[in-house]
Amino acid sequence: ETGVTQSPTHLIKTRGQQVTLRCSSQSGHNTVSWYQQALGQGPQFIFQYYREEENGRGNFPPRFSGLQFPNYSSELNVNALELDDSALYLCASSTGHRSGANVLTFGAGSRLTVL
Amino acid sequence: KNEVEQSPQNLTAQEGEFITINCSYSVGISALHWLQQHPGGGIVSLFMLSSGKKKHGRLIATINIQEKHSSLHITASHPRDSAVYICAAAGNMLTFGGGTRLMVKP
């Protein structure tokens, strides 16, 4: 049984650039959720994808967008990067469509630094 | 006011001590998660519970739905328990507490 893999692990971008982060879900899981964790704070829910459709979104602007593919892997895209986007981005996979209603398996995260 | 509050924010204990971390939430939930995060960022799910009590090894999690409160207990604490412990409430979306940074000294 494979876990959740995220890539890249670290990256540095400049303001205004765009970034794509990737996440492979655990075998048997059909739901992927994304979280932003600023330094020293708890994670914040960005959005969730269930069977290739976004089915929940936190308080993040539209420049945060995502995709889920038929194999249930997922991408998080952030356009027009701002300095405050610097954070650890975590994805988690699970089963079922209700956010947080099932056990989550987290990836190790992608640490984004915006200069 | 955050919808999920944890206390304490920081906790230092001696090896062997009994530890309690508290989590209060203000939203209606379907489940409450306890997570462990080690330096470097990786998060491990410890418990998901919607009522009562769960136990796994030296870890015990309890929840009181009426009082909207959950606790995570660690018995016979060990330096390898040093980590950040985060509770997360599953309402309309998953809402996280700010975490409790635990250091267990030998």
Image (cartoon, rainbow, N blue to C red):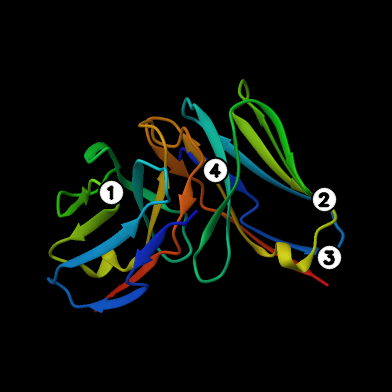
Residue B27 appears at what percent x and percent y? 46, 29
Residues B94 and B58: in front is: B58
Q: Are marks 2 and 3 on the same chain?
A: yes
Q: Say whether residue A88 is visible.
A: no
Residue carrying label 1 = A71
Rendered image quadrant of residue B101: bottom right
Chain ID for label 2?
A: B
What kind of residue is marked 1?
Answer: Asn
Determine the residue positioned at 28% across, 65% down.
Answer: A84
Binning the other alpha carbons within 10 Å of mark 4 as few (below 14), some (14 to 19) or many (20 upward) gives many
Chain ID for label 4?
A: B
Residue carrying label 2 = B75
Residue A69 appears at what percent x and percent y? 22, 49
Q: Secondary structure at mark 1?
A: loop
Report how many numbered discs are placed on residues in the image: 4
Determine the residue positioned at 40% across, 43% down.
Answer: A29
Residue carrying label 4 = B5
Q: Kindly check if marks 1 and 2 are in contact, taking CB atoms under 8 A apart as contact.
A: no
Determine the residue positioned at 33% across, 58% down.
Answer: A23
Q: Kindly check if marks 4 and 2 are in contact, taking CB atoms under 8 A apart as contact.
A: no
